[in-house]
Structures are given as structure tokens and as C-alpha cells.
Image (cartoon, rainbow, N blue to C red):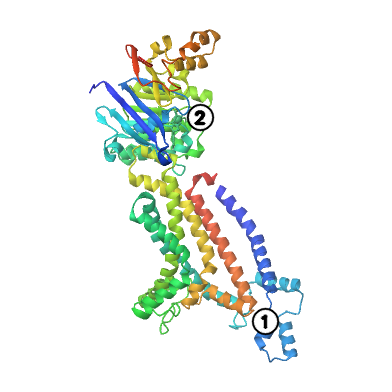
Amino acid sequence: MNTEISLSLNNLTVDYPGYKGSGTTAVKDVSFSISKGKVLGLVGESGAGKTSIARAITRQLVEPGEITGGEIFFEDKDIVTMSQKDLKSYLGSQISLIVPNPKSELDPLLTIGRQLGDVVRTHLKLSKSETKQAVLDVLEAVQIPDHNSRFSAYPHELSGGMAQRVIIAMSLICNPKFVISDDATSGLDVTVQREIMKLMQKIIKEKNLSVLFITRDIGLAAHFCDHLGLLFRGQIVELAPINEFFKNPIHPYSLALLSAFSHSAKWRKVYSTDPEKWSKEFFKDGNVPNSLIEVDEGHLVRMEK
Amino acid sequence: MALLRYIGRRLLFVLPQLFGIVAVSFFLLKMIPGDPALLMLGPLASQEAIDEIRSVMGLDKSLIEQFIIYLERVLSGDLGTSWQTTKPVMEDLLKRFPATMELVTLSLLFALIIGIPIGILASLLKKSIINKFSTYYGLLAGSLPDFWLGLIFIFVFYTILGWAAAPMGRLDLGILPPTVVSGSYFIDSLIAGDWETFGNVVAHLTLPVLTLGLINAGPIIKMTQSTMDRLLESDHIRYARSCGLGEFQIVRRAFRNSLPSVLTIVSVLYSFLIGGAVLVEIVFSWGGAGQYALSGVLNADINPVMGFVVWSAILCLVLYLIVDLLYFAIDPRLRD
Ligand SMILES: Nc1ncnc2c1ncn2[C@@H]1O[C@H](COP(=O)(O)OP(=O)(O)O)[C@@H](O)[C@H]1O
Ligand SMILES: [Mg+2]
């Protein structure tokens, strides 16, 4: 196993079985790998399977979801098959998750300080005062103003942006190696969103984190990521280094998305989709073909050979 | 401060609430057919004697007048006299309410002690025996009448096995009640440090507490289980899991979040049982307040019934106030 790889997915498949066999395959044969210190952007519209991938990596799929195939290697351990105990020792300490809707993800009955402290004490052997110091430090690191008094605040007393900072603090407090950010800014005002993104960018650089950055906004990913994967109905349709992706997008779905997010007419024209391209080499009876073709180094496109 | 303001606002409503309860029950009771004077004196009494009693009792006045007179007396702490016991109702109830409260409180504590762990385990271990057990328990406890279970217990543990104390009240005949402090023999004998009396009190409490506790554990199990089910699937618990928190922490957090629901069901059961334990009281000759009120109803003895209503209303209002304070203590969102 390549020691430079932080996390890799091999043909991950996630199913939500329904009654009498009628289920949904939310994630289908997804493979990618994230090198240490790199950020992979995973972009897709709502329902594409992004959250399912994030939750599969932490093995916290919502009922009745289950991983029905594939492997998830963190460093050289397979998360899919590891024991519950090993998994617990990784989650929150080595691998952490930044979630959307921070206000419903925090326990309404406990203070911020207590919730952060619980995570610290679960993973690190710190004394009471060291724990408190660690919590105050991380609250400061995520630029929560007045962090001494926020320590004893309850989640409902925080604004959405503050709560999101607390979630980020929670994900950083044990110095993880790998962070998953699932649509972290989707519920926030645009200005707050920008501040949070700036903060995350700064922290990722400082701590040299490996990140799976999930978003619906391809523009956001552009500023942020080293690689970009495009998810469509549970499958990767295009995966490329970020520059390559914007210079030479191939899949019609990529083009459509790029043109939809382009602000100027000129760029929309550049990325415009030729109806001819929505052809059978990319879509078979409305579905994408099974093969991913490497068109250039590290640039994969789902199309017929 | 929000808390003080809240309590103040609550107390403001207590008097109108009490007035409403007293008024409604007074007029409802007066609508029950039956003449207390006739019942007191028997069928052979002369018309003059009946009329005299009626005017002594104020029954010859209009309903409104009777109500106003009653209100005035209640406000001065006089709940009238029971013609059955010929004692002031206040005095009777001061003996009988502690008996009922003691029984109900201990029964609910017992119900909580068995109900909460079973509810939590049933929710945690979906495919276990205990989950099935909890389902059937709920059905059984919901369908068995409590007095019937009490009779079975008496039959088995007193009549056949001879383990339990006689179902004849709160103490053996030969034993004197402890000095009154709270009125609860359980507490008072502890305060007095009188172990012999205490042992006897406990022996008499065992079967009725078992009866009411086992029946009322049903809804407590159900409520605990369903709330825990919901919480264990909630966003913040899933998030706590994805932070790697241990199972004990997870369960503790989920349980803390389900406390308000458990508290709600307990307060409902409590206020119901203040009057609703009456059949079990009768089966065990407990001499509680419900029994007292019931015999009032059956004998057109209105003062005990009204006294019971006033007392229960006050107790329930106090209970709900305490419950609200507990909600406050549990949930910081309510404090603003
Ligand atoms: N709890 C669930 N039960 C059944 N199906 C689900 C559930 N959660 C997600 N899915 C299915 O998985 C698909 C992908 O969902 P999700 O991973 O949340 O997508 P995204 O995060 O990209 O919006 C959805 O279209 C839905 O059909
Ligand atoms: Mg999502």
C-alpha cells in the first residue's frame, strides 16, 4: 500500500434496501484515493450520494443503508471490516467529520465546552484542566470570539455560523489526519459561508490535513481542492486534477454543471454542451456506462471505450 | 430570573384554576340525586327532623348561596364535616392523603426503577429477549386491572405462602403509628429511628407497591423505549457516534434527552393515581384518600368528596409546578 495515500475507496457500493427487494443503490462502485495533505472535492447535485459516501467512510449510514461492496482504506486498514472498537478509536481522533446543519448535530442539553471535552477525553488521556485548556485552545483556533464565555454556552445560544465553527473545532480537537467535510456551509449566509471557507482553508494548510471536501457548489470546490470528482447518481462520471478538470472537461454532465455555474456568457459558451455530446458514448438508455476511461494522466471519464 | 418570572406567572394562575375546579365539582356533585338529610336520618325520620337537618346543613338555601358559603369556609381552611365519620374533613384528609401519597410515590419509584432500565435495554438490544419481553409486558400491564393483580398477590403471597403481611391497612393492629411528622409512616418511622415499626410499615407496603408499581411500569417502559429509539437515531447522537464517543456516553446522552418525556408520563401517572389508586386502596384496606372520597360519593356525603377534590387539585398543581421546574433543570432551551 502506498504510504502517501491517506484514504482510498475501492469500488464502494452503498445500498438502501427497501421492502420486497425494491431498494436504492445510492453509491455504486466508487473509487478514488486522497494523498496525504491533499484535498479531493466531491461535487454532485442533491441526491447524488455524497452524504452516503461520507457516512459510509465513518460507518454511520442511516438505516437501512449498508455498505454492500468495496473497501475503504485509511492508511492501510480497511474501515469496512474493522471491529467496532477499532473504528471508535479512529473516529473523532484520526478521521473526523464536519456535518451540515450544525445546530441539530450538537446535543441541545450540553454545553459546547462539555461536548468538546467529551471528545477529547474519549481519545486522549488528559487531566481535567488540560482538557479544558485544549477546548479553549481549539475554540480560539476556529476564531470563536469571546471563547471563554462560549465555553459554557448551549448550542441554541449560537448562531448558525458559530455552531459551524464549533463543529469544525470538534473535528480538529484531537488533531486528526483526515477530515471529511460534508456540505459544511450549505445552511449558512453567503458572507458567513465565505468566512468559514477561509477558516477551513487556513486550517487545512496549517495542519497539512487530507480532506474529502463534499459540496454541491463546483465554484467552491474550484478554490479549494487539488482534485475534483463529479458524482452523478451514485457514480463518479469524471475525476481529474483541478486544473485539468477546468481546462479540459469531457463528460457532458461536467460541462452542463460548469456552464450552469459560470457567471459570464463567455464562460458559459466555453463550457456549453453540444447536444451531440450527450450521446450514447456517455449515456446508455439514460444510464452511464460501466467503464471509466483514463483519458490523460489522472483524468478519468465514464464513457464507452 | 426567567425562572422566577415563570414561577410568578404560574402562581398567578393557581387561584383561578382552583376556583374553576371547585366550582365545577361543586355543581356537578349537587346534580347527583340523593338527599343527605334523608340518608343520615333513615327512612323512618319525621319531616320536621329532616327539615331541621336540612336547614342546619344549609340545604334549604339556593345553590349559589350554598356555593358562596362553601367557598367562604374553604378559604378559612374549613372543609366541613363528614357526617359518616362525624369528624372535620380537613382532619380526616390530613391522615388519609399521606397514606395515599406514600403508596403512590413509592409505587411510581418502583415502577421507574424497573421501567427505565428495561426500556433502555429494550431500545438498545433490538433483537433481544428483553425487547420482546418489553412488548408483551406493555400489553399485559395495559390490560390487567390493578386491583385484580392485587387480589392475586394477596391470594398467593398472603393466603397460600404466608409471606406477606395481612392486607389490612398500613400497620399491624398491635403496633402504634410513629409520631406524625410528614404523615407518611415510611418516613416518620425512619425519622423516629424505630426499626420495628419501619419493618412493619415496609411489610405492609410491599404488596400494594408491587401491584401498582408493576402495572404502572408498563407505560414507563413504553415511553422510555420509544423515546430512546427516536433519540438513538437522531442527528446529534449519530454525530456523537461519528466523533467516536463510547457506547456508555452515547446512551447517557440519549437518556438525558429522553428525560423530559419520561417525566411527562410520570407526572400524568402521578396525578392520575392520586385518585386512581382507589381500587388498590380498597383491596388492601389502605384507608387512603381515594377510598374516603369514594365512600363519600356512595353516601351523598358531599364534604369529603369536595375536600378530596380541593386537596387533589392543589397537589396536582404543586406536582405540575415541580415537574415544570425539573423540565427547566433538564433543558437549557427553556431557560431563556
Ligand atoms: N435513509 C435513507 N433511506 C432510503 N434511501 C436513502 C436514505 N438516505 C439516502 N437515500 C438514497 O440515497 C440517495 C443519495 O442520498 P445522499 O447520500 O443523501 O445524497 P446527497 O448527500 O448527495 O444529497 C438518495 O437519492 C436516496 O434515494
Ligand atoms: Mg448530503
Residue A211 drawn at (x, y percent) = 36, 24
| Residue contact between numbered discs 2 and 1, judged by CB atoms under 8 Å | no
Q: Position of residue B144 (x, y in %)?
A: 46, 67
Residue located farthest toward the front when viewing the structure as drawn: A285
Query: Circle 2 — which element?
Result: loop
Residue drawn at the location 40% of the way across and 80% of the way down: B166
Label at residue B36: 1
- Ligand 2 is located in which of the four quadrants? top left
Q: What's under tag 1, amino acid-wise?
A: Pro
Does residue A248 appear to the left or right of B98 in the view shown? left
Alpha carbons under labels 2 and 1: distance apart: 71 Å
Looking at the image, is A267 positioned above or below residue B249?
above
Quadrant of residue A17 within the rendered picture: top left
| Residue kind at label 2, given as amino acid type | Gly
Quadrant position of residue A122: top left
Circle 1: element type: helix
Q: Is mark 1 within 8 Å of ligand 1?
A: no
